[in-house]
Image: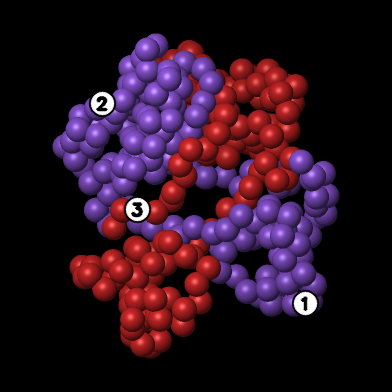
Chain colours: A purple, B red
Amino acid sequence: MTAPLNLDAADRAILRALVGDASLSASELGRRLGLSQPATWRRIRRLTDAGILKGRRLVLDREALGFGVTVFLGIKLAARGRPELEVFERAVCAIPEVQIVEHVLGLYDYRLRVTARDLPDFERVLRRRIMTLPGVGQVESNVLLSEERLPGPLG
Amino acid sequence: MLDDTDRRILRQFQAEPDLSAQGLADRVGLSHGACWRRLEKLRSSGILKGQEAVIDWRALGWAVRVSLRITLDKTRRNAFDAFLEEVRKVPEVLEIQTLLGRVDIRLELIARDLSHYQTIWRDRILTLPHIADIEALMHVADIKSVDELPL
């Protein structure tokens, strides 16, 4: 692993601004921070090349698009399911409603984020697609009520 | 109401959020003007709320990522509000979700390394108000991570 890039106050301000609105142009961003357009552009370029600015995502009104339900699942594999790890991972990733699969340590082996149109739709995904995955043992569901993302330690 | 063309635009834009307006129009086979008008309508109706940059905290030297699953003491009347107000002040917390199920709250927390995690855990997390129970899931690897809705 290469040494982490040292960020100065201007870099952190750029990251904070782009987390709020990734569509800001380098000149607009520079104006806000009191930097020239080329200087801002070079900094964005450096943060991108270092892999710190990983990309962007659209912020969509999920409910208006018909995805009213998000559920977090904790999955524990059955003891005899361990050798099937790769089969499980391939199969779970192929389910379009499953947005996030994380391998974790603790009470569960995997953490999933599942999106569905409504609760009956979620139940269908859970019963037909997830409970039938190879090696699945215990499954715990928690329905998302509200969510906020914070900028993180950029202070 | 959304039609198939709107969905096609959102599907393409979700897959490649870096696309320029012209690039997006080319992908979905619309003129620049037509595509732009539809995007404007999606924005003004609040369906497309914006774009946010994604930071790779690991590349910044934050090597530890933990999901904290918290149960609150619901016999305390303002447990949720008091907890949320305090947890928002912890800079290492990236996400706060309230849940319906066996746990009440999920936090996504990052730390520079395990000893840093131990410090945050002891000084900033265990001191939060009204916690009845808390479990940690240590992140090992992302197997799948897509933000896109299956439109």
Whether callout 1 and callout 3 share a subunit is answered: no
Residue on which disc 1 sits: A38
The answer to whether residue B71 is visible is no
Chain bearing tag 1 is A
Query: Considering the numbered disc 1 on the image, is that residue within a helix, a strand or a loop?
Result: helix
Chain bearing tag 3 is B
Which quarter of the rendering shows the N terminus of chain A? top right
**Marks 1/3: CA–CA distance:** 36 Å
Q: Classify 10 Å Cα crowding around label 3: few (below 14), some (14-19), many (20 and above).
A: many
Chain bearing tag 2 is A
Q: Position of residue A41 (x, y in %)?
A: 73, 72
Q: Amino acid at mark 1?
A: Pro
Q: Position of residue A139 (x, y in %)?
A: 33, 21
User: Of the numbered discs in the image, which one, if any, rests on residue B149?
Assistant: 3
Against A114, residue A142 (above or below) is above
Residue A121 sits in which quadrant?
top left
Whether callout 3 and callout 2 share a subunit is answered: no
Q: Which residue is at 34% across, 71% downward? A: B9
**Marks 2/1: CA–CA distance:** 53 Å
Q: Classify 10 Å Cα crowding around label 1: few (below 14), some (14-19), many (20 and above).
A: few
**2 or 1: mark nearer the eye:** 2
Left or right of A97 on screen, residue A127: left
Q: Amino acid at mark 2?
A: Met
Q: Position of residue B50 (x, y in %)?
A: 47, 63
Q: Amino acid at mark 3?
A: Leu
Q: Earlier in the sequence, mark 2 or mark 1?
A: 1
Residue on which disc 2 sits: A131
Left or right of B93 on screen, residue B26: left
